[in-house]
Image (cartoon, helix red, strand yellow):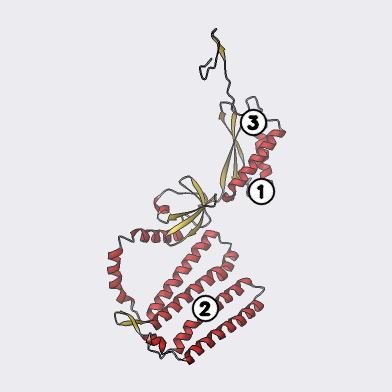
Amino acid sequence: MDSWRSWSWEDILAVILFLTAVILLRWILTGLVKRLFSSRPRAEKAFLSLINWFSYNGILVFIIFYFADSKWLFYELIPIESVDVTLFLIIVALLILTFAFRISRILNRYIFPFFYDRHQLDKGTRFTMERVIHYVIMVIAFYISLTTVGIDLSALAVFAGVLGVGIGFGMQNIASNFISGLILLFERPIKVGDRVLIDDVVGDVQRISMRATIVRTLENEHIIIPNSYFLEEKVVNRSFSDPRLRLTIPVGVAYGSDVENVKNALLQVAADAHEANAYVLNDPKPFVNFKGFGDSSLDFELFVWISKPEDLIPIKSDLNFSIYAAFSRENIEIPFPQRDLHIKSNGAGLFNEKEGQP
């Protein structure tokens, strides 16, 4: 408390003037960057992000330099081995970590996307590179922050060992999921953008974080799944090595229909779908499978390959619309189940066979 009372009116005025100068400088630099880089939005956003960081953290830098001779800034808070952790050291470490986080964000959002677009990298590869770059930058920043404040990492080895034994069992699942997340990023059995089938639920991988993977279902629900699940359980990845997916469209026609006419109509529907939608493929070629003889229909299947699994539902719907229209033009009947009710008389009156009532 006495440390705060030692502030003079000159100190308070200096802080106010500095804040005013920071706000004014930020306004000037923001306008200048927008004017110079208006035709390059990524460069503009990168510079604006740096300006914002310096603006928001300028007060911390000001405190370090202006109050460098103040005792409260170097008051011992936590002793670690031979290093006295002070507010000054905490501020320096905080500045290093936040600056590294901002640099990682700028690189992944505004700089590297140009490289990704140029080399036409897929969404999963981009996400893996972003995570690796972020982790590397943050580990380096953490090391620099510790060495800058004078903390020897070897001095923390014993403390980390004791702490690890004490909470190892409690953090077993967290550590397992973290290591599993790294394996997913490097081995890539699944990646961001893949369409997966988990416990009969279809969804798209949205994000692979340190502990869990987020999968968005077709109903726009988000499932949070521990990373270790993808290494321990069976997961169907429809986009693993080949994004193509085969659609199966079942259809039944009435007995007595011209089966060759049915086949030609279905193949024509597939050909028209290929012309209308580039994601409906002509190689592999569509195929009509005469599945068998049903109770009330001749059962066929139309096999069509698509190159965009996430569009499965709308493509399948369009094919069903087209099949119905084609069968109507060709006078091909689509039957529906029918049930015959037989009523008999035994001389005592009419009986309902189902209920046995007169």
Give SS at disc 3.
Answer: loop
Label 3: which residue? Answer: 334
Q: Quadrant of the C terminus?
A: top right
Other-residue count near label 1 (Cα within 10 Å), few / some / many at <14 / 14–19 / ≥20: few
Q: Which label lies toward us, 3 or 2?
A: 2
Instruction: Say whether disc 3 or disc 1 marks the residue closer to the N-terminus.
Output: 1
Answer above or below: position of 187 versus 248: below
Label 2: which residue? Answer: 56
Label 1: which residue? Answer: 277
Decide if residue 47 is on the left or right side of residue 157: right
The image shows residue 99 at horizontal and vertical percentages of: 48, 76
Give SS at disc 2.
Answer: helix
The image shows residue 268 at horizontal and vertical percentages of: 68, 39
Q: Which label lies toward us, 2 or 1?
A: 2
The image shows residue 303 at horizontal and vertical percentages of: 59, 40
What residue is rendered at 48% in x and 65% in y? 131
Q: Quadrant of residue 25?
A: bottom right
Decide if residue 270 is on the left or right side of residue 82: right
Return the residue found at the far right: 329
- Alpha-carbon span between mark 2 and mark 1: 50 Å
- Alpha-carbon span between mark 3 and mark 1: 26 Å
Q: 72 or 86: which is nearer to us?
A: 72
Instruction: Say whether disc 3 or disc 2 marks the residue closer to the N-terminus.
Output: 2
Image mark for residue 303: none
Answer above or below: position of 319 versus 191: above
Other-residue count near label 2 (Cα within 10 Å), few / some / many at <14 / 14–19 / ≥20: few
What residue is rendered at 69% in x and 47% in y? 276
